Amino acid sequence: MIALYQHRPSPVHQLHPLTKLAISFGVIVLALGLGVDWVPLVLYLLVLVPLSALARVAGPFVRTSLRILLPFAISLFVIQSLFFPEGNTILARLGPLSIKAEGVRFAFAGTVRILLMAGALLLTLLTTHPGLLLTGLVQKGFPPALAYVIVTTLQIVPQMRERASTIIDAQRARGLETQGSLLVRARALLPLIGPLVLGSLLDVEERSLALEAHVQRHNAQDQPLPSAGPHLGAGAQMVDCAGHARGDWLPAC
Amino acid sequence: MIPLALEEVSFTYPSGVTALREISLTVAPGESVALIGQNGSGKTTLARHLNGLLQPSSGRVMIGDWDTRQHTVAKLAARVGYVFQHPEHQIFKRSVQDEVAFGPRNLGFAPARVAQLVEQALQATQLSTVADQHPHDLLPALRKRVALASVLAMDTPVVVLDEPTTGQDAQGVRAIGEIVERVRAGGRTIITISHDIDFCADHCSRLIVLGGGRVLLDGPRETVFAHGDILEQTAVEPPQLVRLAQRLRLPLAWEPQPLLAALEQSQRQR
C-alpha cells in the first residue's frame, strides 16, 4: 500500500482521504447499481482515468490497474466463454469445446467490473498517504490501536526489502553462492533469513522503546507498563502504548 | 598480491542518478587507500564495484587479471573482501568462531586451513577470548570487530572497509587502527571508506577524494591536505593538526611530533 502512494502536487492529493474513499465507493455503487454491462468501462475511462491524469498519476494508475486485472481477465474469458452454462450462440469450435457468445459477454461484464473496482480503490491509494488515510479513519472512530498496527506494518515492508537486499550483498561478499541449483539456493537461505529476522526483531524492540518514551512524554503521570520481559512483550507493548496514545502519535504527514 | 584498475568507469543507478562519472584509477598491491568525500559523492558505489556487487554502466573494473563482469560476486570474494558498515547485516551463526569461519568455508578452503585462518583473524582482532560466545551477546563495538575478523579470515589480497570506525570509542578506533596496520604489514591492499579523516590520515598513505561521482584529488596525504579549497567542495575538513599547521603557516603535519618539531624550528628562527 505504501509502495503504491505517489507523492505529487495535485488537487486530488489535497482532498480529504474520506472524500476520496467516498468518491471511490460512489463510483463503484453507480457502476454496479445500473447493471448495464458497459457502464463500468465508461466510468473507468471517463471518470477514473481523467481523475488520475488530474492527480498526475495516470501512468502508474493505468499500468497497475491493468496488472491487477490481467489474471482475472484471462481466467474469466477462458472459463466463461468455454463453459458458460446457458450459452447457445456458438462463435467458434475448438475440438470438443466451443466458444459461446453469452459466455464472452458475461466474462466482459465481470472483467470491466473488476477493472472499475480495482481502479476506484487504486486511485485513492495512489493519491493518499497511508498515514493520512488512517488519521482520517481514526477521526471517524476507527480503533487507533488497529490503525497503528496497520501503519507500522506498512512502513516495515519497504524497510525489510532494503534490509534483505543489503544482507544478500553482505553474504555474497563473503563468498555465499546465491545462484545455481536448488540445493545451493536452499543452503543460502539460513545466512539470509537469520540476520533479516533477528534484525527485524531488534528493530521492533527499538520501536517499542521509542514509543514508550514518546507516550510517556505525552501523559507523564499514569503509564503502567506491561510486566512481561522486554523481548517477549515488545509486540504487546506496541499495541498497548498505541492504545494509550489515542491517536495523537499518528504521523503528521 | 594483485593490482586493481578502474578504466573509465561510469555508473548510473536504475533510478537515474549517476553516481560515478568516467573514473580511472589504479591501486598497486599493498597500498592503503582511503576514499573520502561527502555523502552521495560516490565512495560506496565505487567500492561496491570492486567485488562485483555493482557492475559499471560503462568502462571496466579489473581485479588483477579478472574483469568483474565475468565473475560472480561469490567468486570475486576470493580476491576482494568487503566489510560492511553494519555487522547486523551479516551475523547469523551462534558463535563468533563459526561466524568467522563462514567466509573461508565458502571459499572452499580445507578444514585445517579454515581453522588456522580463523585463529589468526581472531587473534588479529583480539577476539580469541570471546570465540565461543554468541556474536549478538557482544557489545556493538566488538560485533563490528567480528565482522572485520570474518572478512580477514578469507585471506583476500584486497580488503575493503566501509566506515570501520563508526560507533567506536577512542579505544575502539585505536584497536581498529592497529588491526589495519597489521593487515597492511602482511602486504594486503586496504581500501577504507570513511568520514573519519583523522583515521584516514593515520592509516592510509594515499587519499582519493570524490565529489559528484568524480575524482577531485588523488595522491599522498600531504598533497591532498594542501588543497583545502577542493576538500571544502566535498565537505571534507582536514585533520585538526593539519588545520593548525596551516594557520601557523608551518609545513603540513597530521601527527603531533612533526608539528611540534616544525613549531620549535620556527621559534628558533625567530
Image (cartoon, rainbow, N blue to C red):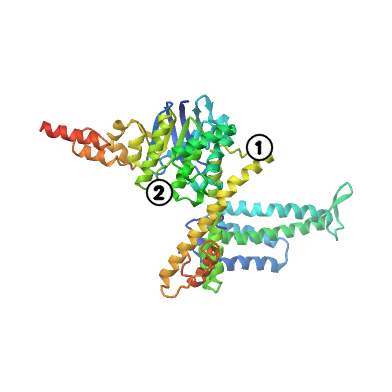
Per the image, the residue denoted by label 2 is B167
Q: Which residue is pictured at 33% across the width and 43% down the height?
A: B235
Host chain of mark 1: A
Q: Which residue is pictured at 29% across the width and 31% down the height?
A: B222
Q: Which residue is pictured at 24% across the width and 35% down the height?
A: B257
B53 up-or-down from A113: above or below: above
Q: Quadrant of residue B20?
A: top left
Front position among marks 1 and 2: 2
Per the image, the residue denoted by label 1 is A180
How packed is label 2: few (under 14 Cα within 10 Å), some, or many (20 or more)?
A: few
| Amino acid type assigned to the residue bearing label 1 in the image | Gly
**Between residues A70 and B79, which one lies in front from this camera angle?**
B79
CB atoms of marks 1 and 2 within 8 Å: no
The C terminus of chain B, quarter of image: top left
* Left or right of residue A253: residue A35: right
Host chain of mark 2: B
Residue B140 image offset from top left, x and y in percent:
45, 50
Residue A93 image offset from top left, x and y in percent:
86, 48
* Left or right of residue A7: residue A118: right
**Between residues A52 and B178, which one lies in front from this camera angle?**
B178
Q: Residue furthest left?
A: B270
**Between residues A120 and B164, which one lies in front from this camera angle?**
B164
How packed is label 1: few (under 14 Cα within 10 Å), some, or many (20 or more)?
A: few
Q: Secondary structure at mark 1?
A: loop
Q: Residue furthest right?
A: A96
Q: Secondary structure at mark 2?
A: loop
